Image (spheres, rainbow, N blue to C red):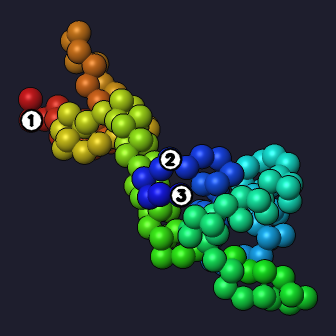
Amino acid sequence: MKSGKSLSGLRLNTLLLLNSGARHGYELIKDLRIISGRKVSPGQVYPLLKQLQNGRLVQITSRGERDKKVYALTKTGRRVVTESISKLGGLLDFFLQSKITACAHCNCEVYRGGYKVSVGPKTLYFCCKDCAEAYRIMK
């Protein structure tokens, strides 16, 4: 897999889990079930790990207890995860931007909560009651 190729679902979650530390296959299956909230089978995970290994994103670092393979990200794998997280962060910023208002007094960004005041036909948004009061005194 080349860097920059989009990642989805199981592949992305697997790489994110491995980014937080090496795991053996059963641990991955268990953790993928938890974070996805759905059934994940060995028939999905092991072929994916083989694909990731062939794409040089994942390597077998050691054989743990009872000869279990332990999977870890390669340098390329870590770079792909970093790039993917960056892209996801950009998407989140884009979608959240429409939900953010600026405080009419201090201009800080407010996502949730805040304080709303009607001034004539206008509605002004503030981050807190103190900013609303300071704005009222200034005007």
Mark closer to the chain start, 2 or 3? 3
User: In which image quadrant can residue 22 be found?
Assistant: bottom right
Q: Nearer the viewer, residue 100 or 105?
A: 100
| Amino acid marked by disc 1 | Met
Q: Position of residue 70 (x, y in %)?
A: 74, 80
Check if mark 2's residue and mark 1's residue have beta carbons within 8 Å.
no
The residue at the far front in this view is 54
Tell me the element at label 2: loop
Neighbour tally class for label 3: few under 14, some 14-19, many 20 plus, Cα within 10 Å: some
| Amino acid marked by disc 3 | Met
| Amino acid marked by disc 2 | Ser
Numbered mark located on residue 138 in the image: 1
Neighbour tally class for label 2: few under 14, some 14-19, many 20 plus, Cα within 10 Å: few
Q: Which residue is mark 2?
A: 6
Numbered mark located on residue 1 in the image: 3
Mark closer to the chain start, 2 or 1? 2
